[in-house]
Amino acid sequence: MRHTISMLLENESGALSRVANLFSARGYNIESLTVAPTEDPTLSRLTLVTRGSDDVIEQITKQLNKLVDVVKLVDLTEGRHIEREMLLIKVHAGGTARTKIEPLIKEFQGRIIDETETTCTIELTDASDRLDAFVKALDYAGIIEVVRSGVSGIARGEKGLRV
Amino acid sequence: MPSSENNHAGSITGADIFVRCLADEGVEYVFGYPGGAALHIYDALYKQDRVKHILVRHEQGAAHAADGYARATGRPGVVLVTSGPGVTNTITGIATAYMDSIPLVVFSGQVATSLIGDDAFQEVDAVGISRPCVKHNFLVKDVRDLATTIKKAFYIATTGRPGPVLVDIPKDVTAHKCEYAYPKTVSMRSYVPVNQGDPGQIRKAVDLMLTAKRPMIYTGGGIVLGEASAALTELVRLLGYPCTNTLMGLGAYPATDPLFVGMLGMHGTYEANMAMHECDVLIGIGARFDDRVTGDLNKFCPNARIIHVDVDPASIAKNVPVEIPVVGTAESVMREMIKLIKASGKKPDKEALVAWWKQIGKWRAMNCLDYDRDSELIKPQFVIEKLYEITGGDAYITSDVGQHQMWAAQFYKFDKPRRWINSGGLGTMGFGLPAAMGVKLAYPDATVVCVTGEASIQMCIQELSTCKQYNLPITIVNLNNRYMGMVRQWQEFFYDRRYSNSYMDALPDFVKLTEAYGHAGFKIEKPGDVEGAIKEALKMKDRLVFLDFITDQTENVYPMIAAGKGQHEMHLKPCKAVVPTDRELA
């Protein structure tokens, strides 16, 4: 099962490597990981996507909670939540190619953020599987570069992950 | 900004702050070794007499000595080393403490903050290198954070599930000045250990315990660490249930008590392992179901409903699914259990218990620890039995790792906690002698014996010099079979007797070696001389005595559960091993 785990982390040097180290040391997978400071500069918000059986996910959350730098943790997958990921993609877009790309961008609600005579760079923010679909749809055009931010997530409803 | 030129009234250097913090924390001994990055601190140590420094001969010895001190006393062990090789040499000792949840605080010097990252002389990323084997670690970048960080380090090391904490201190931080204030307490929003177990879970556990027909109480190092021996003893006696201890838990329940069925696991007793395999309710407390205990997980306690009490939630259901988890300290949870059992008015099923003990009696009658007592060679088990008799079971026994460790665990009956001091989780050869130094410093009047083998002892033999400097009259019992015995045993069983690199060739003359270090040494070659030698050594109260027992090379540790086998699949019958002897190899 794919799980999206989000946590508040002390914004200390080394905190991120403690999390990353835990995954390599115990043989867990990380599919994606994003981290940035919050409105409170002493705290970072880290979101990671991992896969494992229920037992493995239970161990992962327990081991993460045990890290001294982890202040609070939630497995977003356990409740209703929203996930977003940002994609920056640069593709060949010379001649007739552009006319084929533009409807796709419109359909996926992306936007062109840079272009040359022969290339086009698009930004798209959505759920990861929508990004997958967009990348697949653009494949024919000739992809030059793909940059994905990794998943960020937040729970639906009134509750928030706060200290 | 803090600076060395800034001389505010009341400001002192980071080095002086460091030493005052240790003194105010109540630190008695620091085990360490100086070097460039730590020299300001060593200078500050020189100018005071509240904290005593023990100069080891290798930093690994410092970590093990502090560890031994912590295991014997329950107080945190403290280490001070320099940057680079100083701190890398402590890593084995830190990992040893981490695996066995021992509270250590390790201070390492670091190159000046301006040089960090430049590959400076004796620079190593101490925080990065130690990260996987510490409970937590810190790099102190500002002298104003030093005292609070030290307080946090001791707090984290000693609370919850204990463990080692490393504090890396750059040299300039120890030169900068600020005002000294050591916080009395510290609280951290990201670190809040749980102590009391959930009352509902404890009630459920007690209900299940009282329905058991074939109960088993399985406890580990958590009882020792959590000072919960008295509570365990009361609980076990109240219920009349059989109790087994892990290697780390020996002494937590009195070994001479009839309700004790011996150690369990790979080299545990037949009765302990069979009772585990056949039990219907398993009560695990302060133990972590590690692979040397469980054997093949698919065959582990097939009929048991499992209760697991542990202070670390991540230990619960890590290897074995658990029906009733209880997160809390062993002491508080067992006290609550005792209260509930007494208040319930319910009693264990007496009839079922009588039948269960009858069955356990049959397993006991197999006499699984029996060995050849008529041998003309010294049997290692015999040496430990004699050591037990002569010391009245009241010595502090440290050990190294291998066959001698298992024999000590099997044949020395520990009735008290903190008397059995060994590297259980990491299995660190070289642990025994420096650990014994830590114990002897903590309890100068106690009998401290290091049970070791000729392979292990050579891994930290340099500490004989430290023992001389500080006059630490330890007794070393060297079970010398001229083999890495446990490696040889596995090669005999699983590698068709190809004894690859397990023969200890070119051994030193241990008697002469010990004498060269200024101690006394004796070589014992006949079973008839064993008792006399031990008695003689223990009489020499002011000297370290090295007893080199030349033991039977073919002896194996039984019972044995081969790796990957179930608990009930034990090797019991000693077979006559075909092992090339010294003479044949010469």
Image (tube, coloured by chain):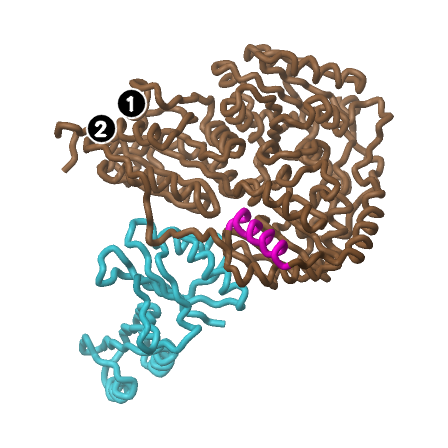
Q: Mark 1 points at which residue?
A: B44
Q: What element carries label 1?
A: helix
Residues beneath discs 1 and 2 located on the same chain: yes
Give the mark nearer the N terminus: 1 vs 2: 2
Q: Distance between the residues labelled 1 and 2?
A: 9 Å
Q: Magenta segment range? A: B329-344
Task: Answer above or below: position of B302 versus B33.
Answer: below
Task: Answer above or below: position of A119 versus B305.
Answer: below
Q: Colour of chain A?
A: cyan
Q: Quadrant of the N terminus of chain B?
A: top left
Question: At which x and y percent is residue B297?
Answer: 66, 57
Three-letter amino acid code of the residue under disc 1: Ala
Q: Chain B is drawn in which colour?
A: brown
Say if the magenta span includes residue B333. Answer: yes
Which mark is on residue B444? none
- Between B310 and A153, the one lying in front of the other is B310
Q: Quadrant of residue B571?
A: top right
Callout 1–callout 2 Cβ contact below 8 Å: yes
* Res. B70 visible in picture: yes
Question: At which x and y percent is residue B140?
Answer: 28, 39
Say if the magenta span includes residue B579. Answer: no
Three-letter amino acid code of the residue under disc 2: Thr
Question: At which x and y percent is residue A46?
Answer: 33, 62
Q: Name the residue under label 2.
A: B13
- Between A99 and B297, the one lying in front of the other is B297
Q: How crowded is mark 1: few (under 14 residues within 10 Å), some or many (20 or more)?
A: some
